[in-house]
Amino acid sequence: MPRLRSVARRLLSVENCPDDTEVSVLLADDEMVRVLNRDYRGVDAPTDVLAFSQLEGDDFGAEGGNVLGDVVISVETAARQAEEHGHSLDKEIELLLVHGLLHLLGYDHESPEDEKRMFARQDELLSSGEAISSDDTKSK
């Protein structure tokens, strides 16, 4: 977990978030992620990462409210993806953390334009070493 904390801190710093920004990270199994995905997104299937923002409009930073949100990563899905991409589970989890944090910061991939913007930022963060170094930077 110290490595994930370090990745999150560096990314939040690069994205100009206050030093006291709070994010929770949950490492879960496919079943837990499937239930959350079903209950909150209406998709009854596991996924690699979910992000739950605690922000409402412009509330971030207002009155000490620096709780950004929650990132939930399926370790089982991450393990499958790591094997498919030929890198370590740790590297895949770090990549998914970056992806989830970008969602909490307002990035999305619902439209082709949004997807291009989000993955460009993700690639930039990962390839520059601002978050982590990775050869394979595309996540779902």
Image (cartoon, helix red, strand yellow):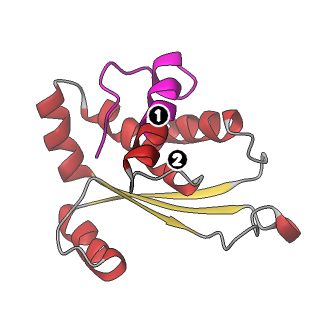
Along the line of sight, which residue is nearer the eye, 121 or 15? 121
Q: Determine whether label 2 and label 1 are within 8 Å by CB.
A: yes
Please determine whether, in this image, residue 88 is positioned above or below residue 115.
above
Task: Measure the C-alpha gap from mark 2 to mark 1.
Answer: 8 Å
Is 97 in the magenta?
Answer: no
Q: Is residue 101 visible?
A: yes
Residue range corresponding to the magenta coloring? 119-140
**Image check: 73 left or right of 53?**
left
In the rendered image, which residue does mark 2 sit on? 102
Along the line of sight, which residue is nearer the eye, 81 or 2? 81
Q: Residue at x 66, y 57 (%)?
A: 22
Is 130 in the magenta?
Answer: yes
In the rendered image, which residue does mark 1 sit on? 122
Amino acid tagged 2: Leu
The numbered disc on residue 30 is: none
Q: Earlier in the sequence, mark 2 or mark 1?
A: 2
Please determine whether, in this image, residue 39 is positioned above or below residue 106.
below
